[in-house]
C-alpha cells in the first residue's frame, strides 16, 4: 500500500529498529544504568536558562502575533537578529533577507534541495556520512555520489572530490563538525574545496552549490574554529539548527543562510521561501522563532560534552583502540579491530556496550560512539571497553 | 538557478504577490481601517485561554522531555489524548497508534501523499479548491484530476466523480468544510462518494484512498454535523490542524489519522512516520504537541466568525449577489455578476473592497470573500458592497 519510493526505506528501517529493540531488551533485563548505550545522537545537556526565560517572557507578554502566521521565511525581526548574530560571530554581512527560518536543519536541507536540485542531478557527499542524506536527495530524485575522506583525520580527499565532479554535479554537501567522525574541516580543506569548485564551475559552465549542514557548529572543542563557508565560496547555502546548541531537538527550529553572493540570490531566496510553504512546513514554528531571537547568544553546556569526549577518548586509546581525537560534534568514530565491524559491535554487547556499525554511515570497518550520554555512563563503561579490548589483543 | 519544478510556481506566485502588494498600497494610501480586505484566510479570533494556560503550565513544570526528541510520530501520551478526543466526538475507536502528530495540516497532507502516492498516479479534487494542493501533488510527481461540484450547493457531483476514476486513480481529496466555498459535505454526499469508491476499488482491483483535509472541521455553523469520513470509508486518511480551532496558525501543529481499517494499516502508519522524518519535519514541535494535549477540548470563539458570516451573507443577498449560505470555514464564494470575475474584483477595489478571483481556486466566474476579519470591517464594508451592486444592476 505504500509508495514505491518508501519501500527501500522501510526495509532499511527495520534493521535500525532491530538494534533499538535489542537495546530496549537489554535495559529491561539488566536495568538502564547497566547498559552503556552509545547509539543515539540526542543532546542530553539541559536547555540553557536564557531559553527557558525567553519562553516564559514571551508567554507572559502574549504579543498578538505570538502564535500567528508570518511570511513563509519567518518573522522579519527574528531573521534580522539571526543575521546580526552570524555577522558578529563570523565577520559576514548578512541581513534579514538572507535568512530563512526553517523546521530544524533537516527541514532546511530539504527546502534547499527542493530549491536547487533537479531530478537526475548529483550530490557529492564525503563518506562516512549521516545516511539520512540519501533520503533527502532521493526526495527530489537526485543521486548521491560518495567522495573519500583521508582515514588519518577524516578530512575530505580533495583529489577524489575533483574526480567525482562531472556534468551532473549540482551540490557538494559538507557536514562539519561531522557526524559520525567528529572531524572539523580545517580552513585549508575549505579553501581547497572552494578552489576546486570555482575552477570546475568555469570548466563545466555550470553552477555547483555547497550545501553546509551545520547542526553541530557550536560543538567544537579545544578552541578550534569552524570556518564559515560562505566566506570562502559564493554559491554556499548554510543549514543550521538550534537542536544541539540550545538542547531543543524536539522544537524543530533552525534556518537557512542564502548569501547575496550566491548566483541569482534573490530568486533563490524567494524560491526557497515558497518551497518551505509547498512542502508543508509553511513556516518555522512561531513561538520557537521568537524564543531563539531572544537568546541567540545562549549556549547549552558544551563543557559537559567535552569532558565526556576527553574521558572516553582517553579510555579508548589506553585500551589500544584506533581513533582520531574528535574536534567537534559528540561522536567518536573508532576503527574496528576486525574487518567486519558488526562482529565487533556484537562482542561489545557482551559488556553491555551498544555501538553503531560504521556501515550505517557508509564507513564500514568502524563503529560510532555517541558520547552525548551521562558522565557516569562514560565512567561505568570503561571496564567493559577494557574487557572488549582484551578480546582482540 | 532554481529547480525546474519550482519555476512554474514562481511564475504563478508573482500574480498573487501583485494582489497583496496592491492591498498594501491601498492601506498605505487610505489607512488600514478604510480598506476592506477579504483576501486572507488567516484566523483572527484570540487564542483560547486554556491554550495559553497550558503553555504557561508546561513551561513552569519544565518536564525533562519538554523540548526533546520523541518518536517521529509524536509523544505517545499526546497521540493517545488525540485518539480519545476523536473517539468521544465521533464515536470512532482509535488509539495512539492511529495518530501521527504533524507540522500542521499542510505537513500532514504532504506526509500522507509521500506515503501513498506514486509518480504518475492521479489525485481527484473537487473544484473549486485550494490550489496549493496542486503543488503538494506535484511534490510527488502525481497528477491532479478535477471533478465537478454542483453549482447550486457546491456538493461534489457524484456522476462526474465516477467518470473521473480510472486505472491511475490513487487518491480522492476531500476538503470539508470547504475552502473556498464554505460548503460542508453532507452525510449523503460522503455516503455517495464511499459507495462509488468501494465499487471502483473492486472493479479496478486497486486501492483508492480518501485523503480528508480538515483544518476547518471545528468551524461549522447552525449546529451542522461534519461527517467523520473514516466511519464511512475504510481507506481514509484524515489530516487535521489546530491552526483554526485554537487560532495558532504560526505554530504548525496538527495530526494525521490512519485507521486500523485502512489496507495494510500497520505498514502505512510506519511508513508515514518515516516519511515525516525524511521529508525533514522529523516530528511535530514538542511544546505544541504537549500544549494541544492539555487543551484538546478548547475552541477559539467560533461565534465571532458566525456573526461575521451572517452579517456579510445578509448584506450580499440584500445587494442581490448570488451565493450559497456557507455552513462552514470562513469563506463566502460569490457569483460574479459578469463572466470575467477579474473585472468584478477590479470594480470592487473602487470601494476599497479586496476579494480574490475564483480562478485562483479553479472556480472562475466567482470571487472568494474571507470573513475572518473584524466585525467592524464587515459593517464598514456594507456601503461599498451596495455601491458595487448598483454598478451591475
Image: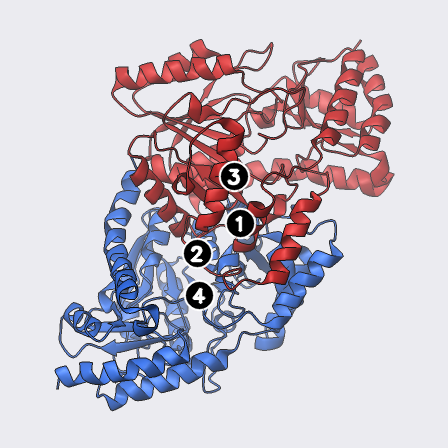
Chain colours: A red, B blue
Q: Secondary structure at mark 1?
A: helix
Question: Do the residues under discs 4 and 2 have CB atoms within 8 angstroms?
Answer: no
The location of residue A223, given as percent across then percent down, is: 65, 20
State the separation of the CA atoms marked 1 and 4.
Answer: 30 Å
Q: Which residue is mark 2?
A: A70
Who is closer to the viewer here, A284 or B70?
A284
Distance from Cα at disc 4 to Cα at disc 2: 26 Å
In the rendered image, residues at marks 2 and 1 fall on the same chain:
yes
Q: Chain of mark 1?
A: A
Q: Quadrant of the C terminus of chain B?
A: bottom left
Crowding at mark 2 (Cα within 10 Å: few <14, some 14-19, many 20+): some
Q: Residue B239, image x and y in percent?
A: 48, 62
Question: What distance separates the C-alpha of mark 2 from that of mark 3?
Answer: 20 Å
Q: Is residue A373 above or below residue B221?
A: above
Establish if A360 lies above or below B27.
above
Identify the residue position indicated by label 3 in the image.
A105
Q: Which of the pair A240/B323 is nearer the observer?
A: A240
Position of A275 with respect to A16 (left or right) is left
Figure quadrant of the N terminus of chain B: top left
Amino acid at each position: 500500500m505504500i509508495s514505491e519510493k518508501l519501500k527501500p526505506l522501510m526495509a532499511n528501517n527495520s534493521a535500525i529498529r532491530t538494534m533499538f529493540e535489542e537495546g530496549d531488551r537489554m535495559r529491561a533485563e539488566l536495568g538502564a544504568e547497566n547498559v552503556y548505550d552509545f547509539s543515539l545522537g540526542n543532546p542530553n545537556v539541559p536547555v540553557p536558562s536564557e531559553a527557558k526565560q525567553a519562553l516564559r517572557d514571551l508567554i507572559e507578554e502574549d504579543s498578538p502575533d505570538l502564535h500567528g502566521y508570518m511570511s513563509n521565511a519567518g518573522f522579519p525581526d527574528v531573521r534580522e537578529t539571526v543575521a546580526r548574530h552570524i555577522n558578529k560571530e563570523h565577520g559576514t554581512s548578512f541581513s534579514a533577507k538572507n535568512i530563512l527560518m526553517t523546521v530544524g536543519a533537516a527541514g532546511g536541507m530539504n527546502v534547499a534541495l527542493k530549491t536547487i536540485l533537479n531530478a537526475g542531478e548529483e550530490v557529492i557527499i564525503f563518506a562516512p556520512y549521516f545516511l539520512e542524506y540519501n533520503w533527502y536527495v532521493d526526495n527530489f530524485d537526485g543521486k548521491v555520489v560518495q567522495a573519500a575522506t583521508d582515514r588519518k583525520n577524516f578530512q575530505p580527499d580533495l583529489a577524489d572530490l575533483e574526480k567525482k565532479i562531472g556534468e551532473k554535479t549540482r551540490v557538494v554537501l559538507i557536514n562539519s563538525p561531522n557526524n559520525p567522525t567528529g572531524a572539523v574541516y580545517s580552513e585549508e580543506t575549505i579553501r581547497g574545496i572552494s578552489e576546486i569548485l570555482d575552477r570546475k564551475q568555469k570548466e563545466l559552465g555550470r553552477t555547483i552549490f555547497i550545501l553546509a549542514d551545520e547542526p553541530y557548529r557550536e560543538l567544537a572543542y579545544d578552541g578550534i574554529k569552524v570556518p564559515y563557508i560562505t566566506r570562502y565560496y559564493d554559491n554556499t547555502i548554510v543549514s543550521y539548527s538550534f537542536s544541539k546548541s540550545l538542547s531543543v531537538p524536539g522544537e524543530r527550529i533552525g534556518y537557512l543562510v542564502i548569501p547575496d553572493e550566491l548566483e541569482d540570490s534573490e530568486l533563490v531566496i524567494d524560491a526557497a521561501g515558497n518551497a518551505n510553504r509547498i512542502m508543508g512546513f509553511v513556516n518555522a514554528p512561531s513561538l520557537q522563532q521568537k524564543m531563539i531571537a531572544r537568546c541567540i547568544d545562549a549556549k547549552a553546556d558544551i563543557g559537559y560534552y567535552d569532558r565526556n569526549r576527553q574521558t572516553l577518548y582517553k579510555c579508548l586509546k589506553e585500551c589500544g583502540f584506533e581513533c582520531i581525537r574528535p574536534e567537534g560534534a559528540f561522536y567518536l568514530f573508532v576503527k574496528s579491530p576486525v574487518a567486519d565491524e558488526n562482529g565487533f559491535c556484537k562482542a561489545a554487547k557482551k559488556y553491555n556496550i551498544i555501538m553503531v556499525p560504521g556501515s550505517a554511515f557508509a564507513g564500514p570497518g568502524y563503529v560510532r560512539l555517541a558520547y552525548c550520554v551521562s558522565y557516569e555512563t562514560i565512567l561505568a563503561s570503561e571496564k567493559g571497553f577494557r574487557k572488549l579490548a582484551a578480546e582482540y589483543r
